[in-house]
Amino acid sequence: MLTLKRADQLSKKAAQIFVPVIDGKVAAPEIAKLFHLNLEDELAFFAPSDKPLKAGEIFEIPVSAAGYKCDRLAFISLGKASATELRQAGAAIGRKLRGKSDDVYLHLDLKKDETKSFLVSANLGNFTWNLKSGAKTFISIIEVRNGDLEVLKSAQLVSDAVNRARQLIHTPSNIKNPEWIARQAKKYANGAKVEIKSGAALKEFGGLRAVGGSSPKPGPRFIQMTYTPRKSGAKHIVLVGKGITYDTGGISLKRPYDIMIPMKSDMSGAAACLAVMSALKDMKANVKVTALLMCAENAISATAQRPGDVITHYGGKTVEVLNTDAEGRLVLADGLAYAVKNLKPDYLIDIATLTGSATLGLGKQYAALYSRNLKWIKELRTAGDISGDRVWHMPLIDDYESALESDIADINHTADKGDFNAGSVTAALFLEQFVDGVNWAHLDIAGVGRAEADSGENPKGGTGWGVRLLLEWIGTFK
């Protein structure tokens, strides 16, 4: 991990200097004087003027100055310093410092929001996680030239929260079960009130029990975390996170086998919600936030639900289960219905690795956003563009609601009636049946919640997607 500090001048302890290059030009006059170098000439050796640098490219040269530990200077290209390029460059520095405990100096002259984005990405790019015996913890310090203290604190807070979500996601499922998630919620509550329901206390939560009953030891958990600001009369945001700690598909077993291997990350929505809650006190959020973590393991056993079962969700709506591998919407439905009945939210958001269809439509760079509130959609899109957790507004198509019809229950949960070929849309329409007109948004993060390989800010595995978006948006409430 990285620790961010302010520095007004080059530290005697810094082992390396990072000098940004924007559109092929160097901006670090005092560094050039200190080492008696012409940095433009040095850069030209690596990057001739006819070959524009890509964001994230790094070139090193040896340096020395009396009284300073620094022996390396690295040019880091920011491209043309667009938002995307700044994140790419920040991540490149983070990766460069992986597996090291170095003290480095970063000459950075950017706007506050640009500096924050760059530094958040640096810490995200630095993330590693493993359970190897004898594994060491490496912490590098980045001393930022004249960095605004509030910007540095905010960048540290946000990036640490994202990496916290990643740690939860990467934890193997033989360790991570619903009870374990509940313990993590208490561990990272940071002042938030934590309430946990299990066993008989879940009698009204038909979806959570149907999915989690397949793994009765320890069984499902309903975890409620509540942050209350000092400000009276604040708006109330409720987050509902899908927390499937492992997903075999249940009796509707996943095929081919390989797609089951990464399913420890099917609790990414709950991890994002937990990580957001852990940061609210320190960011002094001016809005009340409640997170509902709907945690269960979708396993195969004698107590697993069957295709064709009918369950009764919180609030009384009956649902015909047609495919036990579409379990995420079942646990979310209980959470949404509970929030509407008991919490009176001004904003209700669910976040889940829900459908492969979202990935087919949007790839792995944008999450699918569903809502009927156009003003709110604009706010979330803006927060996504600023933070890097980008969303794309998808339609809730009323004509497709007929796909939810059932002969034996109020609705079926896989929207199998008809042939609409819009699995992410119909999944959202299913969830909308449980929000009762409340101001609601659905984030389908199946594409962005996992990465198949190290790329940019993201490590292979869980990305922690959604933490930056939600914290950015929550921060707009004054």
Image (cartoon, rainbow, N blue to C red):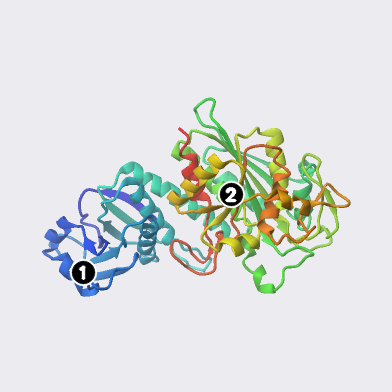
**Residue 296 visible to an observer of this rendering:** no
Question: Residue 43 got which mark?
Answer: 1
Name the spot of residue 251 as percent of width and height, x first.
79, 64
Q: Are marks 1 and 2 in contact (CB under 8 Å)?
A: no
Q: Residue at x 29, y 50 (%)?
A: 110
**Residue 231 visible to an observer of this rendering:** yes
Task: Identify the amino acid type marked 2.
Answer: Gln
Q: Is 103 left or right of 461, judged from the image as shown? A: left
Q: Which residue is mark 2?
A: 184
**Quadrant location of the N terminus in the rendered image:** bottom left
Task: Identify the amino acid type marked 1.
Answer: Leu
Residue situated furthest top in the rendering: 232
Name the spot of residue 273 as percent of width and height, x first.
57, 47
Q: Residue at x 59, y 56 (%)?
A: 445
Badge 2 density bin: few <14, some 14–19, many ≥20, Cα 10 Å: some
Question: Residue 4 got which mark?
Answer: none
Q: Secondary structure at mark 1?
A: helix
Foreground of the two, 408 or 119: 408
Q: Is 320 left or right of 340, judged from the image as shown? A: right
For the residues marked 1 and 2, what is the alpha-carbon distance in whole angstroms?
A: 48 Å
Name the spot of residue 379 as percent of width and height, x first.
50, 42
